[in-house]
Amino acid sequence: MDSVEFGRVPALFGSGTLVLAEPLRPVFRAWHGPKMHLLAADGTVLATLHETAGHRYVLRNLADRPVLTVHLVAGGGLARPRFQVSGADGSPIGEVRSPRRLSHARLLEAQAEGGGTLRATRSAPAGRTWLMTDQHDDVTARITVSTARSFDGLQRYRVEPVRIADEDQRALVVAVAVCLQVVRRWLAAPH
């Protein structure tokens, strides 16, 4: 095994386009598999996302080692959601939260542990593409949502890097895609 795999943020996130998708599952039977798959652009599964106790979402590589953890620490109901993001070794990477002033265009802001802010914005209330912009309003990535299967609304998020500074920032962009899914689909769903 490569030593990079055990660092703060694994090389798993690479430099190309990634897809975070809900797996196709049986419609009329209970599903006990992963919540989502992280795929390379060619469809190769790189990791799986599992929900553990306490609204903790853990992205695990194919060797079943955690590579990214997104923990919902506040939110649900009418409260604004706030997530803590940590790397493979458990060290914090940043925080993703709903901005103080909600708008249809800006849904989430990500604060990197080492400084710097990324914002997920979209141009229209029903827009399918979120632009990740930094504190200088430069686009760092695009996250495009689509429906993988219309019958039950399974979601797919395509993460396309534009100008990402480092692996921590790339992991934070993937974490924002997980947070978008949690906020848009799982927190809003009846339990």
Image (cartoon, rainbow, N blue to C red):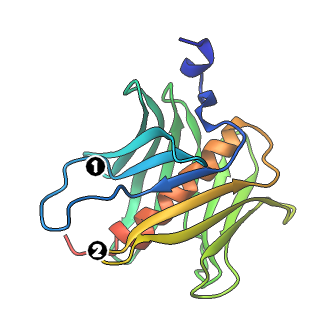
Q: Residue 151 or 163: which is nearer the viewer?
A: 151
- Quadrant of the image for the C terminus? bottom left
User: Label 2: how many residues lie within 10 Å, few (<14), some (14-19) or many (20+)?
Assistant: few
**Residue 58 visible in this rendered orientation of the protein:** no
Q: Residue at x 67, y 36 (%)?
A: 14
Can you tell which quarter of the image residue 10 is in? Answer: top right
Q: Position of residue 69 (x, y in %)?
A: 45, 41
Horizontal and vertical percent for residue 60? 41, 35
Numbered disc 1: secondary structure: loop
Residue beneath the point at 40% across and 24% down: 63
Residue 71's label in the rendered image is none
Which three-letter amino acid code belongs to the residue tagged 2? Ala
Residue that numbered label 1 is attached to: 54
| Residue at image location 48% in from the left, 29% down from the top | 90
Mark 2 or mark 1, which is nearer the start of the sequence? 1
Residue with the mark numbered 2: 189
Find residue 143 and report its horizontal and vertical position in percent. Answer: 63, 63
| Residue 47 sits above or below residue 104 on the image | above
Question: What type is the residue that disc 1 sits on?
Answer: Gly
Q: In the rendered view, does 9 fall on the left or right side of 134? A: left
In front of the other: label 1 or label 2? Answer: 2
Residue 160 visible, this angle: yes
For the residue labelled by badge 2, is the local secondary structure a helix, a strand or a loop?
Answer: loop
How far apart are the alpha carbons under marks 1 and 2? 16 Å
Q: Is residue 93 positioned above or below 116 on the image?
A: above
Foreground residue, 56 or 34? 34
